[in-house]
Image (spheres, helix red, strand yellow):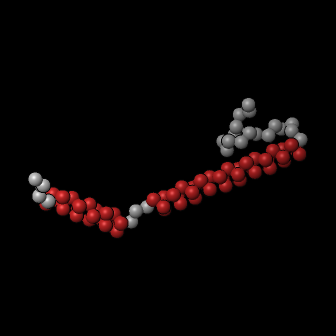
Amino acid sequence: MRPRDRNGTEPVPSGAKNADSEYSTLAERKERILRLRLSNAMRRSSLEQLRERTVTAAECQATMNRIRAAVSGEILKLPEA
């Protein structure tokens, strides 16, 4: 395995033919594009899931009011004999 440069790509050997280095560069570019597309798709789907799971403040308050009403109603009930 060859050492990688700071961009994470393998350097092209100096003795390589021009066609080989050109193919290598095109292959790396295609891989980068595919990785970016996959990353963007994953980010979009996770944002979409967050939107579906978001609870508004009004919904939260309405739920809390229903809980308060149910709990206070049970506390005020007289025990059945």
Residue 81 in percent (x, y) is at: 10, 53
Tell me what residue is drawn at x 48 percent, y 58 percent: 50
Q: Is residue 36 above or below residue 54?
A: above
Which residue is farthest front? 81
Residue 80 left/right relative to 35: left
Q: Which of these two is toward me, 66 or 19? A: 66
Residue 72 in percent (x, y) is at: 18, 61
Which residue is farthest bottom? 58
Q: Is residue 17 above or below residue 42?
A: above
Tell me what residue is drawn at x 62 percent, y 56 percent: 41
Quadrant that contains the N terminus: top right
Residue 24 left/right relative to 45: right
Q: Which of these two is toward me, 67 or 6? A: 67
Q: Which of these two is toward me, 18 or 23? A: 23
Residue 29 in percent (x, y) is at: 75, 50
Residue 54 left/right relative to 14: left
Q: Is residue 25 above or below residue 50?
A: above
Tell me what residue is drawn at x 36 percent, y 66 percent: 59
For residue 56, which quarter of the picture? bottom left
Residue 11 left/right relative to 6: right
Tell me what residue is drawn at x 21 percent, y 58 percent: 71
Total number of numbered discs in the rendering: 0
For residue 57, which quarter of the picture? bottom left
